Image (cartoon, grey):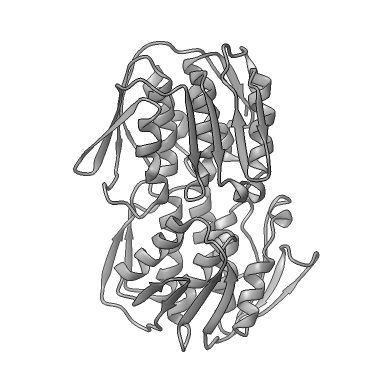
Amino acid sequence: MNLKLEHYSKPLNGNIQITGSKSESNRLLILKQFFSNLTIENLGNSDDANYMQKALASEEEVVDISHAGTAMRFLTAYFAVADGRETVLTGSKRMKERPIKILVDALRSLGANISYELNEGYPPIRIQGNKLSGGKVVIDGGVSSQYVSALLLIAPSLENGLELKFEGKITSVPYIKMTLGLLASIGVKVKWTDSTIFVQPQKEIEDTTAIVESDWSSASYYYSLVALSEEATITISSYKEHSLQGDSSLIQFYKELGVTSTFNETSLTLKKELPCKNHIEFDLVSAPDIAQTIAVTCFGLGISCDLTGLHTLKIKETDRLEALKSELTKLGADISVTNKSLHLKASTGINKDVLIKTFDDHRMAMAFAPLLLKTSLEIEDANVVSKSYPDFWKDIESLTK
């Protein structure tokens, strides 16, 4: 379904309840498999979380997780320790192009029995679950944090726990800290010293209720709307001032783009108050999922930007850097990208009625939507937002009707 967005120029005011974090939901769903007395509240309703739940409940040999990249990484580790179960883990055409070798190699070093069904280093993979004793694993610090989190989530179930040593600079530290924070919150003993993480084995926990915070990546689109508006006050729920999610750095990034953030218990009010800068430079190595939103915001504001730390965007649902370059260029942007950065020059106008291709990427659809405050445009395959935020278009309509 393509969706036509008409230009909207009135002030924005409203209250939005955003679904639970996809990242927190998926981590807690894995942990619940090891600790049945863990109760989860405000679980996200994203496609990714739904695929994770279906996969964990499935008794079939073949488990298809479609586009759910987080589920692919986390389930690879989980099924590796599912003693006595044989599983073929597969996904969409794009998922079969996304590398899994680094995680498979790490699991094999712990004794996991995993083989490739088609192409070496890529899904689908066949996993023969067995009891792993754990121990020491060495991994490149520059890999996706999802590989690291996948290992950390199964660590309490390992007889000897896990000693995870990084080589080189560590990528996406906040996502690793999120995983460790959730482990600690349910009573698992963790320690991060210099370049090594230690997770102690744990068979049982006390009865625990974990409340999933709303998704900060989803909040980014409201930050963009407020930044691009002439006048706006939007309250979003439910958010914590001291969040485990790395994308909460939105507060500081968007302050430079004219948006103030005010917490009130579990809600967050965004307001257009400050003048924005003419040029910004952000290192997004700790929050790469908000790069698309920031790039589109800067284009809509007519300002230049240099965004770095984006090397993990090459292996997401699409090559997000090339996708941004393609679609922003259609709108009139002067933009260039490398394998790890994006560079946008200041612009003076935006083309009308452009069809934005989403490349099966939910964040492409949502990142471009706020441009309706500057021009009319059309979003291809608008339903792709269900991957992380099924109610997105309904919530946007409530602000612009």
Between 154 and 347, which is closer to the camera in this rendering? 347
Q: Is residue 29 above or below residue 254?
A: below
Q: Is residue 224 visible?
A: yes
Residue 348 in picture, x, y percent from top left: 56, 12
Residue 153 in picture, x, y percent from top left: 46, 71
> Which residue appears at 42% of the width and 70% of the height?
31
Residue 305 in picture, x, y percent from top left: 53, 30
> Which residue appears at 56% of the width and 14% of the height?
376
Q: Quadrant of residue 27?
A: bottom left
Q: Is residue 215 visible?
A: no
Residue 58 in picture, x, y percent from top left: 56, 67
Between 364 and 349, which is closer to the camera in this rendering? 349
**Quadrant showing the N terminus:** top right
Q: Residue furthest right?
A: 118
Say left or right for 396 vs 308.
Answer: left
- The mark total stands at 0
Say left or right for 172 vs 102.
Answer: left
> Which residue appears at 61% of the width and 46% of the height?
313
